[in-house]
Amino acid sequence: MPAVHDEFERVRATFRVLLDGAADEELRRRSDGTRWTNRQLLFHMLLGFLIMRALLALAKLVARLPAWFGRGWAKLLNAGTKPFDVVNFVGSWLGGSVMPRRAMVVLCDRTIAALHRRLDRENDSSLARGMPYPTRWDPFFREFMTVEDLYRFPVQHFDFHREQLSLI
C-alpha cells in the first residue's frame, strides 16, 4: 500500500512543521471549533496514530470471533460514547498541556515508523479482515472497518483536525 506509506510521511512532515514552526503563543491559542488549544489539538491529532496499535490488534482479534460478537461489541462501545468522549477530551487536554514539543515530534516519528513496519508485514488477507465499529465515536468510523480502512483512519483524522488549527 504505497499510497498509505506516502500519506504517513506527509503527516509526519506536516506535524513536525506545525510544531516546530509555531510560536508558543500560537500553540496556546484556542483552536477553531474545539475546546482545545492548538497544542492540545496537535496532541489529539497525534493520538489518532497512537491508538492504531490497539485498534489493529482489536480488529484482528474480533475478526476471528463470531459475527454476533463483533456487532455486540460495537453496540456496547456506542453505548459508552459519553465516557469515551470525556477520556478523549481529558487525555488530549492533558497530553497537549504537559508533553514537550520535542517529545511530541519524537513520538510521532516513532509511531509512524512502527506503523510503516507493521503495514509492510500485512498481506491481502490480513488487510481484508475487519470488525464492526462504534460509529458514534468518530465521524470516520464506519459500521464495518477492515484493517486496510484502519490504516487510512489516522490520516483522515489528522487532515480533518488540521483544518481546525488556528495557527498563523
Image (cartoon, rainbow, N blue to C red):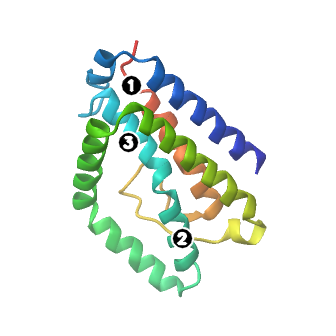
Q: Position of residue 65 (x, y in %)?
A: 54, 86
Indicate the amino acid at tag 2. Answer: Ala
Q: Residue at x 40, y 51 (%)?
A: 138
Indicate the amino acid at tag 3. Answer: His
For label 1, the SS is loop
Q: Position of residue 74 (x, y in %)?
A: 41, 71
Res 7 quadrant in image: top right
Q: Is residue 34 visible?
A: yes
Indicate the amino acid at tag 1. Answer: Leu
Few, some or many C-alpha atoms within 10 Å of disc 2 (few <14, some 14-19, many ≥20)? few
For label 3, the SS is helix
Res 104 quadrant in image: top left
Q: Residue at x 77, y 66 (%)?
A: 124
What residue does disc 3 label? 44
Sequence order check: which comes first, mark 2 or mark 1?
A: 2
Q: Position of residue 76 (x, y in %)?
A: 32, 74
> How far apart are the alpha carbons under marks 2 and 1?
31 Å
